[in-house]
């Protein structure tokens, strides 16, 4: 596979893993396509390293999606314990 094929494959994997990460996190995820791609690429890279070290084979995909979901949670600006008052003080 040439360099163009590798880049296209990388983009597809990034969007798929990032999209799955967004689906795992409940509620709205106000991040764009660029952040979804970056989150997916980072999640896929770190998850595949972790799965390779542990020798998990195909289960590695679950690590990739879980890491991407955690990154989606962090990047989308959500924080634990933050409640909205609905305009009332």
Image (spheres, grey):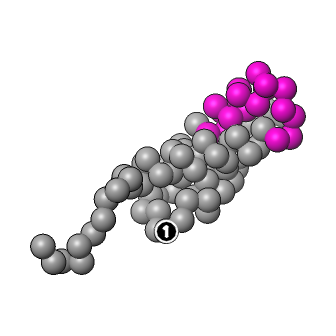
Name the residue at 34% across, 56% down: 81
Residue sticking out furthest to the top: 53
Residue underneath mark 1: 27
**Residue 67: x and y, percent?**
60, 42
**Residue 12: x and y, percent?**
70, 50
Task: Tell me the chief SS of the magenta region.
Answer: helix
Q: Which of the 4 image quadrants contains residue 49?
A: top right
Against 82, is 48 above or below? above
Residue sticking out furthest to the right: 57
| Quadrant where the N terminus is found in the figure | top right
- Horizontal side, residue 60 vs residue 19: left or right: right
Tell me, yes or no, whether the highlighted magenta stretch contains residue 73. Answer: no
Residue sticking out furthest to the left: 89
Name the residue at 66% across, 57% down: 20
For numbered disc 1, what is the local secondary structure? loop
Q: Is residue 40 at all visible to an observer of this figure?
A: no
Name the residue at 68% across, 53% down: 16
The residue range painted magenta reads 43-59
Tell me, yes or no, whether the highlighted magenta stretch contains residue 54. Answer: yes
Against 68, is 89 above or below? below
Q: Is residue 32 at all visible to an observer of this figure?
A: yes
């Amino acid at each position: 596979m040439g360099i163009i094929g590798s880049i296209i494959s990388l983009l597809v994997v990034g969007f798929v893993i990032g999209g799955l990460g967004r689906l795992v996190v409940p509620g709205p995820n106000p991040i764009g396509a660029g952040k979804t791609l970056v989150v997916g690429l980072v999640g896929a890279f770190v998850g595949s390293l972790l799965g390779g070290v542990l020798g998990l084979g195909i289960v590695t995909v679950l690590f990739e999606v879980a890491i991407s979901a955690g990154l989606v949670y962090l990047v989308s600006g959500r924080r634990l314990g933050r409640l909205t008052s609905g305009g009332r003080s």
